[in-house]
Image (cartoon, rainbow, N blue to C red):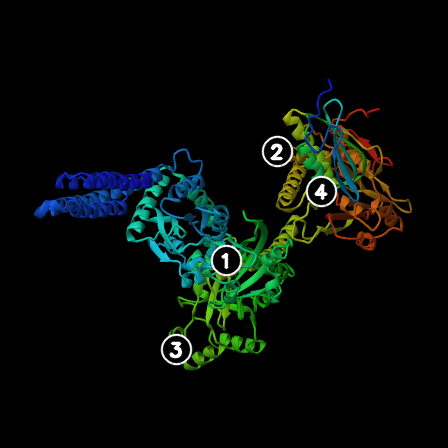
């Protein structure tokens, strides 16, 4: 259309020239040459207007020669036409400039509209490049930054032949380009708008290989400019424009416009929150990964880290994640010594990410990683999983968990388990503590000592271990020669008093000098090389029972973790010490209490010989529940023997209750059934049911009155007869309220008759097969008549031969032999008791009021 | 008594009980068809094993409990005490606890000696 307008203007000039040549209208007609110029100025570009103007001026000059008659005025039309042409050219320029502005305004408007109805940011960005190509560029592409990874190219548009191939190349290009020097990369790094010739130098710097170079050449791009897509200060993307085949060139004005346009588009994107959504998703992901305690890195097939979270940066000891992304493969690991659990170095091919690259499914790898710079050792568990990106490239996602605490805990737990075994191996605390001290060296200390206070509260060394056995003697000698000052603010006594640990991470020579006045002592202490120390109370049950001291002589220094661990160890050692002490104390108490519950010595019984045997079951720390007692009553003597169920303090209290109740009862009413009834009443007043079995016998002259409450019946050995049981079974005590005493039985006796009272601990004694039982006891009794002491010894021997395994129950035995000595008459005014008819006589629970003399 | 769903919460469906076994002692808890619980004890009831019976009796999982002691070969004073305690607890809790006592063996001897037969409520042996 513009060409048609130009042709029309030229034709109009030619027509005017013909009219001019044929007529002689004077200079007025000559001036008409200016009309097509003015018309052209409205429609054609300034260059063409200039052409038409030139033609008009030339024709005006010719017109003067054709119409030579004008004389002096021939130049007037020439001046008019020339002036008008100049104005027309100027006007055309103004008009053209206005057109460009209108086009730019349209683009700016459209750029601001790209988000209307856009599905997502990629859709909106594609619209943006559509607006720019071909009006402003031959090709345009957009890169968007991701918070911790490489930029992503989200849109590309090209114009002209081969546009589709070029667009594909542009989209593919971003991930492979060594783009550090490319204008878009500079923009993304925040370096501002870029304008560049794609000369050989720049092309060489940014192409990734021959194929990339070929495509670059094929594209025909000669110039490029890149401008930021930014929301506020934050650059999140780069818009790049390329000029090539069209022959256009970019200048500062184009760059300024592109920047303006990009700003407008960015504002639209920002308003539509598409960017926020994109960034939000990325930030959420990054937030999730960033908040993880585990380090996460993503490596591409070549081992290059393409993503890393903050924990990964910390793990590698780097200031930020960008530094990791810039690092070459292997560079990061050079700063660490990586070992297996057992100390073997980890080879690069053993890393899980390498296994992923080989297409394997690696097992998690536990490593001990020592930073070469600091010497700090940490335990890491590295798990890798394969991932394919949108281009199908294989990535390895590494999750590196810092398991130092768990691992250290495990190691310490193992140590404490060992310590626990050492501590429980013996009840001799000196031996135990020596083992614990030895265990602490060298794992926790180069030298470890344990001190316990004596009765004056002065610490005495109990155990000492040194990593160098030769130094043990010196350390011991020094301790002996210069015992610690009990008043010193630092040291064992201070810890013993306060119950609070003292941690001396760094012991300097100066500190030693301040603490020690004596020259020789100072010299010897220096030679021991104390560098770091912990003094820890041994606390058990809220009481400080001793002090443990841990000393380092090398480069290692104690920290709070070491202190916590030492305290744990010390408290376990304390419990062991306390247990040993309590055991000793309890054995003592048990022995004392047991003795108080049994008669120290059997009283002399006129007409009777008696012997007793008692053994407590288990390890001797508990008071048993079997009891017996013999005491005088009005008409002779009373014997009780029984079993209180249970052990310990409760059993001791019940035993005491039963014995005292029986004594008191017998004092008022010596009938055995009455004694049992009263004991029953006392037991029923106990808060918990307290069953007691018991035999109660009143020893008379030539006879014995017996009542049995739930207890094994006594055996009677008479002459050569086999042993037989005497008495009637009665209900045990403490089970019912209405208890009138067991059935009383009077057993007439001849001199030499022997009775055996015993608790079930005797017959229940466990052997290799079964229990001792009645039959075996009977067999011992049947061996022949024996004095009480010998009888008990025989039974004891038989039990010892039979017994197998631990002794679970107590046992008590009482042997009584009637020797027939007559009682002194007249003591109670009742005269001589006469034995009743032969054989035991049963009496009802109501009991014969006429007592045992019948 | 009307048959209903087993109230026993110890292990598995009704009729399936738990078995606590040791060398010379075992204890079975099972639900009766009529909603009661039956505890069967075999072997030796003494200082070492009585706590297991005590625990089973403390939370039998049913209102009516039958304790079958006929399989006992031995019982000592701790066993006696356990039975008496359970009996007293049941009486104060208002639940029904009945015993099937051994007829012979070492445990029978203990029962005769102590006279607990006169205290413990016994049940007729089931057919």
Camera-near label (1 vs 2) is 1
Please give left or right for residue B45 compared with residue A230 in the image: right
> Label 3 near label 4: C-beta < 8 Å?
no
> Label 2 near label 4: C-beta < 8 Å?
no
Residue sitting at 34 percent across and 45 percent down? A262
Residue A38's disc is none
First in sequence: mark 2 vs mark 3: 3
Residue A213 point in image, percent of width and height = 49, 59
Crowdedness near tag 3: few (<14), some (14–19) or many (≥20) residues, C-alpha within 10 Å: few
For numbered disc 4, what is the local secondary structure?
A: strand
Which residue is label 3 attached to?
A517
Q: Quadrant of residue A444?
A: bottom right
Please give the chain letter of the residue carrying mark 1. A
- Seen from this angle, which residue lies furthest left? A72
Please give left or right for residue A315 compared with residue B42 in the image: left
Please count the marks in the image. 4
Residue A677 appears in the rendering: no
Which residue is label 4 attached to?
A643
Camera-near label (4 vs 3) is 3
Camera-near label (1 vs 4) is 1
First in sequence: mark 3 vs mark 1: 1
Residue B69 point in image, percent of width and height = 78, 33
């Amino acid at each position: 259309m513009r060409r048609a307008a130009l042709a029309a203007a030229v034709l109009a000039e030619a027509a005017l020239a013909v009219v001019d040549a044929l007529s002689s209208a004077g200079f007025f007609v000559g001036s008409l040459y200016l009309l097509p110029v003015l018309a052209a100025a409205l429609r054609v570009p300034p260059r063409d207007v200039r052409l038409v103007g030139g033609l008009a001026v030339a024709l005006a000059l010719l017109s003067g020669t054709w119409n030579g008659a004008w004389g002096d005025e021939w130049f007037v039309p020439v001046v008019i036409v020339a002036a008008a042409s100049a104005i027309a050219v100027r006007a055309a320029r103004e008009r053209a400039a206005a057109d460009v502005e209108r086009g730019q305004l349209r683009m700016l408007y459209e750029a601001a509209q790209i988000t209307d109805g856009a599905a997502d940011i990629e859709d909106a960005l594609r619209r943006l490049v559509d607006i720019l190509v071909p009006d402003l560029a031959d090709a345009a592409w957009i890169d968007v930054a991701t918070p911790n990874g490489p930029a992503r190219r989200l849109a590309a548009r090209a114009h002209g032949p081969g546009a589709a191939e070029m667009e594909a190349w542009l989209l593919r290009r971003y991930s492979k380009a060594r783009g550090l020097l490319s204008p878009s990369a500079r923009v993304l790094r925040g370096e501002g708008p870029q304008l560049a010739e794609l000369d050989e130098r720049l092309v060489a710097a940014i192409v990734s290989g021959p194929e990339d170079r070929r495509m670059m050449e094929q594209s025909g791009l000669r110039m490029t400019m890149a401008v930021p897509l930014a929301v506020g200060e934050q650059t999140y993307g780069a818009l790049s424009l390329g000029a090539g085949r069209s022959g256009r060139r970019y200048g500062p004005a184009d760059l300024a416009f592109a920047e303006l346009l990009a700003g407008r588009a960015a504002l639209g994107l920002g308003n539509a929150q598409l960017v926020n959504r994109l960034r939000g998703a990325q930030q959420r992901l990054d937030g999730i990964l960033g908040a993880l305690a585990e380090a996460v890195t993503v490596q591409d097939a070549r081992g290059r880290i393409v993503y890393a979270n903050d924990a990964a940066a910390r793990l590698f000891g780097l200031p930020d994640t960008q530094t990791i992304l810039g690092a070459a493969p292997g560079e990061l690991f050079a700063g660490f010594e990586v070992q297996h659990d057992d100390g073997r170095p980890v080879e690069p091919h053993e890393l899980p990410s390498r296994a992923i690259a080989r297409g394997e499914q690696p097992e998690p790898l536990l490593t001990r990683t020592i930073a070469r710079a600091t010497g700090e050792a940490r335990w890491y568990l590295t798990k890798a999983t394969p991932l394919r990106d949108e281009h199908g490239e294989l990535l390895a996602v590494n999750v590196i968990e810092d398991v130092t605490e768990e691992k250290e805990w495990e190691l310490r737990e193992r140590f404490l388990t060992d310590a626990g075994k050492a501590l429980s191996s013996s009840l001799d605390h000196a031996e135990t503590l020596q083992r614990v001290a030895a265990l602490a060296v060298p794992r926790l200390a180069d030298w470890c000592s344990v001190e316990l206070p004596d009765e004056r509260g002065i610490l005495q060394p109990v155990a000492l271990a040194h990593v160098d056995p030769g130094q043990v003697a010196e350390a011991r000698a020094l301790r002996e020669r210069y015992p610690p000052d009990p008043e010193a603010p630092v040291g064992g006594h201070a810890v013993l008093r306060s119950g609070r640990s003292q941690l001396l991470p760094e012991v300097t020579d100066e500190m030693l000098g301040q603490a020690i006045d004596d020259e020789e002592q100072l010299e010897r202490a220096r030679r021991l090389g104390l560098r770091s120390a912990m003094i820890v109370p041994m606390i058990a049950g809220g009481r400080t029972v001793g002090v443990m001291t841990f000393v380092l002589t090398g480069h290692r220094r104690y920290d709070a973790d070491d202190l916590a661990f030492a305290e744990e160890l010390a408290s376990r050692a304390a419990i062991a010490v306390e247990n040993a002490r309590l055991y000793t104390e309890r054995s003592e108490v048990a022995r004392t209490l047991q003795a108080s519950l049994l008669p120290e010595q059997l009283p002399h019984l006129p007409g009777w010989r008696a012997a007793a045997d008692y053994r407590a079951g288990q390890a001797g720390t508990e008071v048993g529940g079997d009891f017996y007692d013999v005491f005088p009553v009005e008409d002779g003597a009373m014997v009780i023997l029984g079993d209180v169920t249970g052990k310990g303090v409760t059993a001791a209290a019940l035993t005491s209750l039963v014995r005292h109740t029986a004594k008191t009862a017998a004092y008022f009413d010596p009938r055995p059934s009455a004694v049992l009834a009263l004991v029953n009443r006392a037991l029923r007043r106990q808060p918990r049911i307290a069953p007691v079995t018991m035999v109660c016998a009143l020893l008379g002259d030539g006879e014995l009155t017996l009542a049995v409450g739930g207890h094994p019946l006594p055996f009677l050995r008479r002459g050569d007869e086999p042993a037989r049981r005497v008495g009637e079974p009665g209900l045990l005590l403490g089970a019912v309220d209405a208890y009138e005493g067991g059935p009383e039985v009077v057993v007439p006796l001849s001199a030499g008759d022997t009775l055996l009272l015993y608790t079930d601990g005797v017959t229940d004694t466990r052997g290799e097969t079964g229990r001792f039982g009645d039959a075996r006891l009977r067999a011992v009794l049947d061996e022949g008549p024996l004095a009480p002491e010998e009888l008990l010894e025989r039974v004891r021997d038989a039990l010892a031969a039979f017994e197998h395994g631990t002794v679970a129950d107590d046992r008590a035995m009482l042997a009584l032999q009637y020797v027939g000595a007559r009682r002194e008459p007249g003591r109670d005014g009742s005269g001589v008791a006469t034995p009743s008819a032969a054989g035991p006589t049963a009496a009802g629970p109501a009991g014969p009021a006429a007592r045992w003399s019948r | 008594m009307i048959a209903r769903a087993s109230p026993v919460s110890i292990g598995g469906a009704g009729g399936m009980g738990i078995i606590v076994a040791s060398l010379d002692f075992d204890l079975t808890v099972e639900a009766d068809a009529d909603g009661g619980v039956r505890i069967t004890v075999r072997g030796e009831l003494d200082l070492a094993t009585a706590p297991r019976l005590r625990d089973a009796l403390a939370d039998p999982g049913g209102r009516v409990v039958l304790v079958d002691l006929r399989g006992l070969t031995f019982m000592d004073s701790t066993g006696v005490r356990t039975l008496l305690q359970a009996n007293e607890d049941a009486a104060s809790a208002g639940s029904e606890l009945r015993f099937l006592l051994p007829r012979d063996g070492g445990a029978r001897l203990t029962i005769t000696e102590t006279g607990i037969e006169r205290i413990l409520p016994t049940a007729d042996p089931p057919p």
